[in-house]
Image: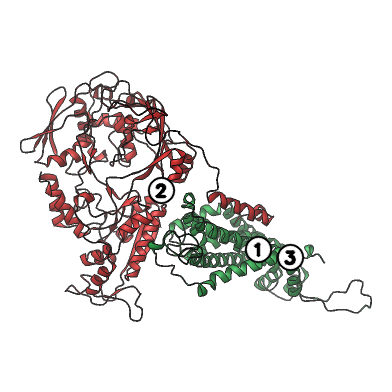
Amino acid sequence: MTAAELPVPGGGTGAATATPSLARRTAAVFARNKLALAGTVVLAGLLALCFLGPLFHPTDQVHTDLARANLAPGTGGHLLGTTDLGYDMLGRLMYGGRTSLEVGLAAGLLATLFGTVYGAVAGYFGGWLDAAMMRITDAALAIPALFLLVVVAAIVTPSKPVLILVIASVAWLSPARLIRGEALALRSRDYVHAMRLMGGGGGRAVFRHIVPNALGTVVVNATFQIADAILYVAYLSFLGLSIPPPAADWGSMLSAGITYTQVGHWWLIFPPGIAIVLVVAAFNFIGDGLRDAFDVRLRKD
Amino acid sequence: MGSRSTRIRTPLTAVGAALLALAVLAGCAVKTGKVTDVGATGGTRVEGGTAVMALPPAATPNWIFPIAAPGYLASYNSAIQNLLFLPLYTPEPKGDALTMDSPRNLARQPRYSDGNKTVTITLKPGYEWSDGEPVTARDVAFWFDLIKHNKKEWAGYSPGLLPDDVERFDVIGERTFRLRLSRAYNPAWFTANELQNFTALPAHAWNPHDESPKAVFARLVQHAERLSQFATDPLWKTVDGPWTLAKWNTSGQVTLVPNKKYRGPDKPHLDRVVLKPFTTSESEFNVLRAGGVDYGYIPPSVMERSDTFEELGYRIDPWEGWAITYLVLNFHHPVAGPMLRQGYLRQALQHLIDQESISRVIWHGSADPTLGPVPASLLDRDPYPYDPAAAKRLLARHGWRAPAGDRDGVLRCARAGTGPGECGKDIARGQELRLELLTQSGSTETSNTMQEIKSSFGRAGVALDIRQQTLNTVLGTTVPCKSTEPVCSAWQVGFFGTQGSWYFPVNPSGEQLFATGAPSNMGNWSDPETDWLIKATEFSDDPGALRDYGHRVAAQLPVLWTPNPAYQVSVIRNDLRGIDQNPTLTLAPQDWYFVRKGGRENWPAS
């Protein structure tokens, strides 16, 4: 959809006024959603904590220090205490957050990218190709994602690239189905017919018309995909299938902390747990805000 | 990644639910009440009652026949079998050592003669099978015939040992038999490691038609494979032990009741003992907190709050195993093998393992340093204590250098060759000092131990890449191999010792562990001097033989010693008494009894 000049309803003078661009209108609607704004602030805060925090609070997250293990928050200069191996908990939260956010973002975006192209191709071309591609999607959706993830993660030694590929390999199914539905509707639009009459091919239709016009759906879905990917990283790590130590992520930190539930070491559980909740909630709030902003039917004005 | 329709659409609710879940996980759950009013001591002893004991996580008893088929050699199987069918000799702790002189023994102490080539054994009088028939020497001969003619099907068979080392078995009386051995053996070793296998089996009930040993063995194994019929099959009803079987579920839950015909000195006091299986330690822990087991276990991390369980009416008692724990080194690995074969390098690596701190901090005091291949009491000192500076010196003296411009980088061999001050045979110039460790997953303590070792190695310039897999995968990978076999390239260093890597036979000699080609010599260690010393422990009755073997292997480091954890940190109801946690993992629930409030314990010693 391109920006267009619209008649001003009930214009007293009858003079035509230029409307704001799509991006500006979308941003305006998004900005009116308080939860979405809060989500953006929280996400920005977490990103700053994980990627800029170590500049102000440098810690050794590679070598253990058993002499300083299990210190309570506030003791020995450790604001959030230390872990059972003597790592500074605040530093570990930053260090682990990098892995969770990097893998979550990369896996979510990769899944959205592949799913979008896959769904757009299936929806645009239709016929037997659509039927075959969608049956593959249906079959893959029938297998529980967590089961697949656990099996694959148990076979290969997890690393950041491996985790990204493994999570993306099960996460692309949902955007593929969603974009395929959009493509089915878009392919019968006049501008697509016109492009065909002028000799445009399938590739041009998919990449220049279908995908750009489904961008709103893609962006909204991407935020949910990222949130889900971060949760999947946490699931896998919680089950012991994370990147080998001394690497850490919030899921593996939570898993290690659970061991100390009975001895009251709450500082090993709450920080990574709350961080996971906050980042997932933030992406969901942002996704909901973007959906409202992109969806004309939901616009309040 | 799943349908969006299941997403919780009110995000605040989702956040609230997640925080609530965290709060519950963090221990804000409802507190359970006391299980007993009786303290850890005192109380009046009572007869009867049912005790529920938790089996180790994922342990499912599945074999009742006292001759174990391969794959059924688990300690919980043999512990149950020994309660039904008495072994002739049972290990009994005496001080720091184990002896085979137990009042539970079915036989009197063996008499060695003819220069230790003949053993004469007499069964104690008065023992009967549960159908009233006496237990005789023919019942032991029946057991021996079964293993002699079916040794390949017996999981305990090791070539050259039982039954190969017994040339003749003669029944010379109703309760007496004589063994003619293939050569003279050390009596202490033979009694502890060979005679402990001897068991009397009811020949009159299991072989009434005098079938051949092969035919009767096949028939008995057929019955032993029918797990669902263990409790009802008449074959397993004829027992001579203190207990008889009441139930055996396919899920592995076993219920035992006293054998009324038992004639031994340790008659059961309880009415019933239930051995309860659990899939994970977490599920066991939850049932324990709810008061569902009388004798269970907790993770070592919870020892710090043992007062919580003491308030609930339990006592904490770590169950120390007769075991050692170590990192196995694969000397046949094509890349790591040449490095691991260098004695100075193994010494340096051992100097980098801080066993004291790991035992105290990571295992919360429930582990003890391993010093060598025999119990620590037989070794007077640690030849390679934690000393990072000594480790760095050893490596530097043998030509290992950090890369130029990176003092903290991984060491590389700067002086290849076999001369003094050089890296050693088959190590190329420029080779990195990098090892990969395949370790079992599922234990926070094990994972933390490996992280600590990695960190310590890293400070000295030794890279250790950790790969975690399930215990079964680790056990299936870390097997003895030839350097040309693909499996030998699959691992460099292995660890499977969350509950101890190796449980000794009663005499902790190394014929199965460090002898060349031994079945449990996973790292393919081969040292003629070690082999000679192991043979000396088997053949010579010199009490110094075991000590010499221990010192030699402790100095040679065929493995890297790590802290030896307790078998489990037991949690026992205060009113359940008489529990003696045998380090060889045998059970004796016939000694257990309950007490009730008031009075003092007053029970004749059994």
Say few, some or many: other residues with alpha carbon within 10 Å of mark 3 (under 14 / 14 to 19 / 20 or more): some
Q: Secondary structure at mark 2?
A: helix
Say whether residue A181 is left or right of residue B311. Answer: right
- Depth check, mark 2 against mark 3: the one in front is 2
Rendering quarter of residue A275 = bottom right
Rendering quarter of residue B253 = top left
Give me the chain letter of mark 2: B
**Do marks 3 and 1 both belong to one polypeptide chain?**
yes
Query: Which residue is identified by label 3?
Result: A33
Query: Along the line of sight, which residue is nearer the eye, A228 or B241?
Result: B241
Q: Which residue occupies the extreme bottom position in the image?
A: B405
Q: CA distance from mark 3 to mark 1?
A: 18 Å
Give coordinates of residue B324: x percent, y percent. 27, 50
Rendering quarter of residue B524 = bottom left
Chain B's colour? red
Query: Along the line of sight, which residue is nearer the eye, B577 or B136?
Result: B577
- Residue type pointed to by label 2: Met
Q: Which chain is green?
A: A
Give me the chain letter of mark 3: A
Query: Which residue is identified by label 2?
Result: B303
- Residue type pointed to by label 1: Asn
Say few, some or many: other residues with alpha carbon within 10 Å of mark 2 (under 14 / 14 to 19 / 20 or more): many
Query: Which residue is identified by label 1?
Result: A221
Please tell me which of labels 3 and 1 falls first in the chain: 3
Q: Is residue A152 above or below residue B396?
A: above
Q: Secondary structure at mark 3?
A: loop
Residue B427 at least partly seen:
no
